Amino acid sequence: MRKIVLFTLLLTTFTAPASAQNILSLEEVKAWVMSNHPLAQTADAVEERGIAEALASRAALDPKIDIAYDRKDFKGTEYYDYGKAEVSWQSPYALKIAGGYQVAEGTYLNAERTLPEQGQAYLALKLPLLRGLLTDETRIGLRKGELAADRQRAAADVIRNDLRYDLRVRYLEWAFTDASVILNEEIEAALQQRLVDYRQLVRQGDKPAVDTLEATVYLGLQRQAVAAARVDRDLAGQALAELYWPLTPNDSPEAFPVSVGPLPDTSALARHPQLTELSLALADARLSLELKNEARKPTLNLEYYLLGDGFDLPETDNVLSEAYKMGLTASYPLLNRKARAGAQLAQLKVVESGNKLTDKSQALRTKALAYRQAIEDYTSQIASGELLADQAARLLAAEQELFALGESTQFLVNTRQQALLKARLSVVKLRFAREKLVATYRFLLAVE
């Protein structure tokens, strides 16, 4: 326990910054980006597009008004004057209902256009008896519209998941380079203080003056390392600023967590937006296959019109059988190659979509399990690295005591110090690598 406490103190001792630093958490950065970044707003637009597509699919059920007027006059003779107004509605099933009113007058009316003097209202029922009875383009379109809304929502979630992952990795790289700067600055401060102390010993005659040059060289090399680390931090900050625009020079990242919190289970893959998107694509392909199979049936359509005398029903014993118009149409291509080929292509599309879903699901699951195991492996490596860093700290402390007693050299003290810096940087790198693994694992599961 004492070793862990000692190492923690060494790892968390940082040089105080010249100006007040604002600790910027990943959650704060993510909240801003997911609300304001153009990619996040694009995801919102994609999701709204799905709502619009669903609305467009429901337009097939909108009541429709049709008005037609046809008139012919020649040399003072009114050949015909025909008008018609109709309201029709396609039900969510096969039946189509229409109601209208038509008038016709003139000298040369066609017999089929001859109507009662006050015009004629009618109620029409239209029903397909074979193709289109069980399903048709309207009903398939409605179901596809519902799928479209879900697919666009899943596509939007894919964009958000990619954006969150990119942001998290950039933030981690910024945090890693910042921790590297802090560690190097701490070593620089220690070397600076050692040079001051050594010069004091030289003035007192306890140490040779030539060793001052050696300490100056070590300090110069460390300052170069600090400068390089700062450049890396600035570049990482600029990369983060591409996504998080309010980033300022006074902002600092949070330190890497000492431990990994609870990880989501791979069962979360069932809600992965990419798998949802592929699953909906498979459902869409199956709907297309259903429509193509329906197209292989013969066409047999029945129409029935209940006719009125003006706006009133005629005075007969049985209106349904004495005041009506009925029609029946049938057709079927002899070879029906187009419909059969369409069904075959639709079936192949179903197979293709199913294979894509299976492949992506297996790939995500395999990768997720591998990354979860890697996270556990890195946790073990971090524990070993912390032990090595603790031992390096003890060796440095012992070497400094020997140096104070005149039994060691500047070179050995610097060697121990560099070993400690390397060990501590190694722990930071391991934590950085583990956090990237955690970020990738969450990305593969599409969880925050």
Image (cartoon, grey):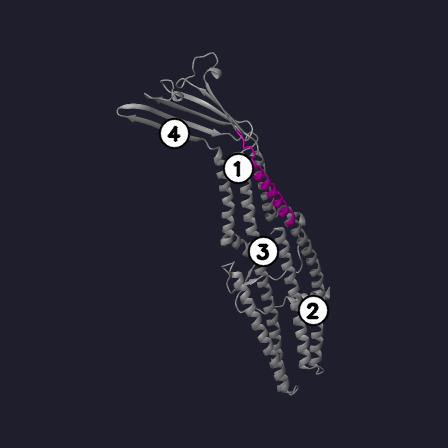
Looking at the picture, does residue 255 appear above or below residue 145?
Answer: below
Secondary structure beneath label 4: strand
Looking at the picture, does residue 47 appear above or below residue 187?
Answer: above
Q: Which residues are magenta?
A: 331-359
If the image is split into quadrants, where does the N terminus sit? bottom right
- Using the numbered discs, state the Cα–Cα distance from disc 4 to disc 3 in whole angstroms: 57 Å
Residue type highlighted by circle 4: Ile
Sequence-earlier tag: 2 or 4: 4
Q: Is residue 321 left or right of residue 81?
A: right
Q: Is 340 contained in the magenta span?
A: yes
- Using the numbered discs, state the Cα–Cα distance from disc 2 to disc 1 in whole angstroms: 65 Å
Q: Which residue bears the numbered disc 2?
A: 389
Q: Which residue bears the numbered disc 3?
A: 165
Identity of the residue furthest to the left in this view: 76
**Residue 60 in sight:** yes
Q: Nearer the viewer, residue 433 or 71?
A: 71
Residue type highlighted by circle 2: Ala
Residue type highlighted by circle 1: Gly
